[in-house]
Image (tube, helix red, strand yellow):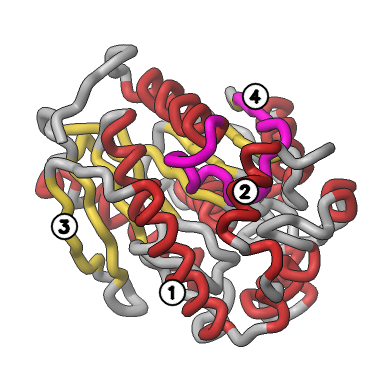
Amino acid sequence: MPLDSQAKALLDFIGITTLPGVETMTPQAARDRGKTFMEMRKQMGGVEPVHQVRDIDIPSPAGKIPARIYTPAIPAPAPALIYFHGGGWVLGDRDSHDGVCRQLANTIPCVAISVDYRLAPEAKFPAAVDDSYAAVEWIAANAASLGIDPNRIAVGGDSAGGNLSAVACQLARDRKGPRLLYQLLIYPATDMRMNLPSIEENAAGPLLTKASMVWFMNHYLTSEQDKLNPLASPLLAANLRDLPPAFVLTAECDPLRDEGEAYAKKLRESGVTADSKCYAGMPHGFFSFGAALTQAKEAVEDSAARLRAAFGLALHHDSAA
């Protein structure tokens, strides 16, 4: 499965494939490097304007959770996508995924809310889960003041954020919490056992490797037993019935490909409507490069189209920015 030529040219241009893996770094050094790449990505694609962008703090039992609200020029109450960023539960924040949230808010269009949950190793599992679900509950409870339709709330995220989105949907069902309309799972981590074929097939990456996945999990989890907990490995949940419909995106050259596809398959076997699509020749992380990769733009539009349908929006909308 060769890497897509456009993706290879981009990665060669950025120079990321020649740098040491995160598994050789401290979490802070990896975060600092990530900010450098974020600035580079911003310079390549610019900052897409959104009608209104504001930062808030969401109260929770563990303290304030930073969040960022992106509101296009659409009538209230509007549908909303609660977004959880990727980064292996160790890296990332609302700034690292600012471009993705802007693009989704405008393309769908809907209110997008980026949740800056606590990171490991400073806050280990299940801190990110607790923050993510607390944010879902608070946003649903305060929908009116946020200009959001409480009956049209979806969750989504990439990689670790896809993991947290899947877990949030399971928790909302099990705890009789907010009714979530849809889940957008972008190359999600769903099985911490790391025993599916794509882990070995794509062990060398690029962008995500088997070694870096082990590094992320070792920072996030506290024990081997945590790997079997459905709050860490949503694929291992005994019951996936009665969950929101899903779109599961996977990348062919990604170590996490098979667990994303396995989750979509298990959802379908449980009676949940779950579309899935594997993007040929794409590496983990490609969704964030919408300004440079044709298939990333396609993936954003594929996601937006499904969320439009779930939200009951018109097929096309030129949102004012």
Q: In the picture provided, is 104 more to the left or to the right than 141? A: right
Q: Residue at x 43, y 55 (%)?
A: 41
Crowding around mark 1 (Cα neighbors within 10 Å: few <14, some 14 to 19, many 20+) is many
Q: Earlier in the sequence, mark 4 or mark 3?
A: 3
- State the SS at label 3: strand
Amino acid type of the residue that numbered disc 2 sits on in the rendered structure = Pro
Q: In the picture, which quadrant includes the C terminus?
A: top left
- Find residue 271 and report its image quarter: top right
The residue lying toward the viewer, choosing from 75 and 14, is 14
Q: In the picture, which quadrant includes the N terminus?
A: top right
Q: In the picture provided, is 22 more to the left or to the right than 291? A: right
Q: For marks 1 and 2, give the CA distance.
A: 18 Å
Q: Residue at x 37, y 47 (%)?
A: 45
Q: For marks 1 and 3, give the CA distance.
A: 20 Å
Residue 188 circle label: 2
- Residue 300 pos. (x, y %): 46, 33
- State the SS at label 2: loop
Q: For marks 4 and 3, give the CA distance.
A: 38 Å
Position of 32 relative to 305 (above/below): below
Q: In the picture provided, is 125 more to the left or to the right than 23? A: left
Q: Residue at x 61, y 87 (%)?
A: 26
Amino acid type of the residue that numbered disc 1 sits on in the rendered structure = Arg
Q: Earlier in the sequence, mark 1 or mark 3?
A: 3
Answer whether residue 268 is visible to the viewer in this image: yes
Q: For marks 4 and 1, give the CA distance.
A: 33 Å
Residue 54 circle label: 3
Q: Earlier in the sequence, mark 2 or mark 4?
A: 2
Crowding around mark 4 (Cα neighbors within 10 Å: few <14, some 14 to 19, many 20+) is few
The residue beneath circle 4 is 271
Q: Residue at x 48, y 41 (%)?
A: 292
Amino acid type of the residue that numbered disc 3 sits on in the rendered structure = Arg
- Find residue 115 and report its image quarter: bottom left
